[in-house]
């Protein structure tokens, strides 16, 4: 099968790769680019484990073709931290033990970042709605929601 040459930006870095016409962005990230943070949970866009941000929009990597990345800006969980400094959401997830097995965590963190990028001061209901596309089999979601709310509150304080 012929390969398609794609030029894009992944986690702030100019990136080029080859993919087939049927290869998903999730498969490209994991198998071609070696970015294994996004997980395949369902392969049908129902669980959110493969969530990435494409041009400031939350997307399921399993539903996007790799060829569609041409000219786009993609953020994965690997791009959230700045060097050794965790993103405030990541820090709160650690502090509040808002993760367990870790399969859903990258997708939840990316979805939470997308939410806070467009709504930096969400209510609890808005957080729950914003994360509704991300399923977790291990937690009751309360610690996740608290972590997002606390990260938002901290960022609001820093901005003052």
Image (cartoon, helix red, strand yellow):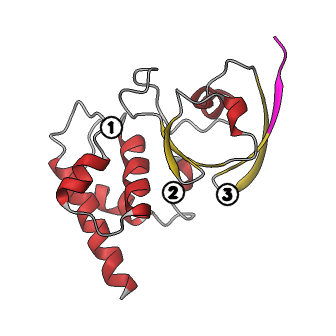
Q: In x, y percent, where is residue 60?
A: 48, 34
Q: Say left or right for 79 vs 15.
A: left
**Among the 4 quarters of the image, the one containing residue 138:** top left
**Among the 4 quarters of the image, the one containing residue 36:** top right
Q: In x, y percent, where is residue 128?
A: 22, 49
Q: Earlier in the sequence, mark 2 or mark 3?
A: 3
Q: Earlier in the sequence, mark 3 or mark 1?
A: 3
Q: Say left or right for 69 vs 36.
A: right
The residue that label 2 is drawn on is 80
Which range is magenta? Answer: 1-6
Residue 131 in view: yes
Q: CA distance from mark 2 to mark 1?
A: 18 Å
Q: Say left or right for 111 vs 96.
A: right
Q: Is residue 151 magenta?
A: no
Helix, strand or loop for disc 1? loop
Q: CA distance from mark 2 to mark 3?
A: 10 Å
Q: Nearer the viewer, residue 34 or 119?
A: 119
The residue that label 3 is drawn on is 12
Helix, strand or loop for disc 2? loop
Q: In x, y percent, where is residue 24?
A: 61, 25
Q: Earlier in the sequence, mark 2 or mark 1?
A: 2
Which residue is depicted at the point 18% across and 58% down?
Answer: 124
The residue that label 1 is drawn on is 134
Which residue is depicted at the point 29% across and 33% down?
Answer: 135
Proximity of marks 2 and 1: CB atoms separated by less than 8 Å: no
Give the number of the mark in front: 2 or 1. Answer: 1
Q: Which quarter of the figure is the C terminus placed in?
A: bottom left
Q: Which quarter of the figure is the N terminus placed in?
A: top right
Vertical placement of 78 versus 47: above or below?
below
Helix, strand or loop for disc 3? loop
């Amino acid at each position: 099968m012929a390969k398609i040459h794609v030029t894009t930006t992944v986690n702030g870095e100019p990136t080029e790769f080859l993919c087939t016409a049927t290869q998903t962005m999730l498969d490209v990230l994991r198998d071609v680019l070696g970015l294994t943070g996004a997980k395949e949970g369902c392969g049908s866009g129902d669980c959110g484990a493969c969530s990435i941000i494409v041009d400031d929009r939350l997307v399921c990597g399993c539903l996007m073709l790799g060829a569609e990345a041409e000219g786009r800006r993609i953020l994965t969980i690997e791009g959230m931290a700045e060097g050794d400094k965790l993103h405030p959401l990541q820090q709160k997830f650690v502090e509040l033990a808002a993760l367990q097995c870790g399969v859903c965590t990258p997708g939840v963190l990316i979805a939470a970042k997308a939410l806070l990028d467009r709504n930096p001061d969400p209510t609890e209901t808005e957080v729950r709605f914003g994360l509704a596309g991300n399923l977790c089999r291990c937690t009751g979601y309360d610690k996740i929601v608290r972590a997002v709310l606390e990260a938002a509150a901290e960022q609001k304080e820093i901005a003052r």
